[in-house]
Image: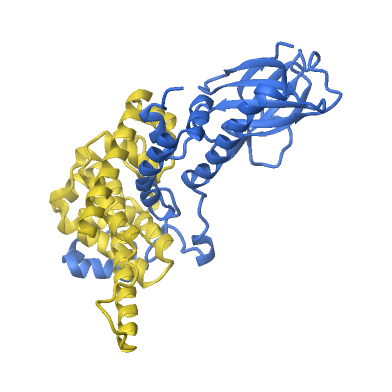
Amino acid sequence: MEHCEPEQLALAALGEPLPSDDAAHLAACETCRAEVASLRRGVDLLAVPEFAAAGPSIAPPPRVWDAIAAATGASAAATGVPRSPAVVPEPAPDNVRVLRPRRSRLLLAAAAVVVAAGAGAIALNRDDVVTVASTTLDPLDSSRATGKASVVEEDDGSRVLRIELDAPAAEDAFYEAWLADTSAVGMIPMGTVRPGTTSLTVPDGVDLADWPTVEISVEPIDGDPQHSGVSLVRGALDT
Amino acid sequence: MLLDRRRLHLGSVPDVDPVPALRGASEPDDQEVGRRFGEGEEQALAWAYERWAGQVHGMAVRAFGPGPDAEDVTQQVFVSAWTGRSGYRQESGPLPAWLVGICRHKIADTWARRDRQRRENEAAVVDAQARPGGPVTAGVDTAVADRVALLDELELLGQPQRGIIELAFFEDLTHAQIAARTGLPLGTVKSHIRRTLERLRARLEVDGGALRA
């Protein structure tokens, strides 16, 4: 395969998941990996939690304005400056340190895992497993996500639903895969899916002819095990 | 007045909800504050502080915890912004985004200063032990210096490149989300990201070479 597009390598340096072809190539290609590593240095240096734009607003104590006014001579004109922390109460130091985990760092680790898993799956595909059903996953609603799903049967007869999902990382939510019956009323939860490749075990006794639809939903982290009603992609397995 | 606040498309600061109780009818909107700040009107400095000091200080507290260091950084941001107000270009972004950018520099400068102090202290300890040999080079943290250099390099970027990379770095958006936010085509966003990361890499190579020379 040809090398990854330079733009794709830049996205990999940012920690974005790559389409499976690119991810598989990257796993195997020293040149492309070195390129990603060299581009990633700038990302690692700047995409740090301390520089993140979104964070709690904390009103400084009044002496800060006093010092600014003294340094700039602006005190005479300052009429609207709150003299006390009127905007947001100062949180306890413990709260202050709670930061949203950075996608860049987490996904770099995740991408490495996906890359490794992808490479392994390709090797497996050649010898040990049989694909029994597959489908493309098409975007629903306003999503621009796409993907592929296949069910493979391994040597021991167990079946694995392998999902390749090309979607942005979910924000304050996660993706979940479901098998649905033909009426799309009954649904079997299959587990959490991440952008990239995810393998899930299909329960024994589930006849794919009865449960042919693969759907991925966006689930808020609210503890509710029901389908959220927000669907990302869907496809019908050709059994 | 709330309705006509312009939605920010670029720049690294999301809209900050104003505090209506503190906002008199005669007070200008954020854009107007930015304009008057640039013109050197002292009341605009006070308004800017009233509206965005919490955000700036919040960043400083995240970096250093509550206390004198964070307060120093917040103070430096507003004093530097005021003295350097002729450098503020309203067309390249709203004032709060500019303030937050200055805040990143001040945080990076403070890290660099601490690192320098740490090395001096370590060197002093080694000197006190009268260690024979050449000058002491207690572990220079190159990441600290590199970070300062890269923030400088970001300053040199024009729009939309700068806004795009700031959304990726500081708001953690994917290229698809950046395209959606800015209305730019996906391919444009991707190629800007690529070129900016190349540029940052080149800056690191130049500075690294200068350090070693």
Q: The blue chain is which one?
A: A
Closest to the observer: B173 or A58?
B173
From the viewer's perspective, is A6 left or right of A215?
left
Q: Where is residue A22 in the image (x, y as percent from the top left)?
A: 48, 27
Q: Residue at x 33, y 70 (%)?
A: B114
Q: Where is residue B181 in the image (x, y as percent from the top left)?
A: 39, 31
Q: Residue at x 83, y 18 (%)?
A: A207
> On screen, A98 above or below B198?
below
From the viewer's perspective, is A10 left or right of A212?
left
Q: Residue at x 33, y 83 (%)?
A: B126
Q: Colour of chain B?
A: yellow
Tell me where residue A148 sits by quadrant: top right
Closest to the observer: A88 or A167?
A167
Tell me the quadrant of the picture where the N terminus of chain B can be found. top left
Closest to the observer: A144 or A62?
A144
Tell me where residue A141 sits by quadrant: top right
| Residue B27 seen in the figure | no
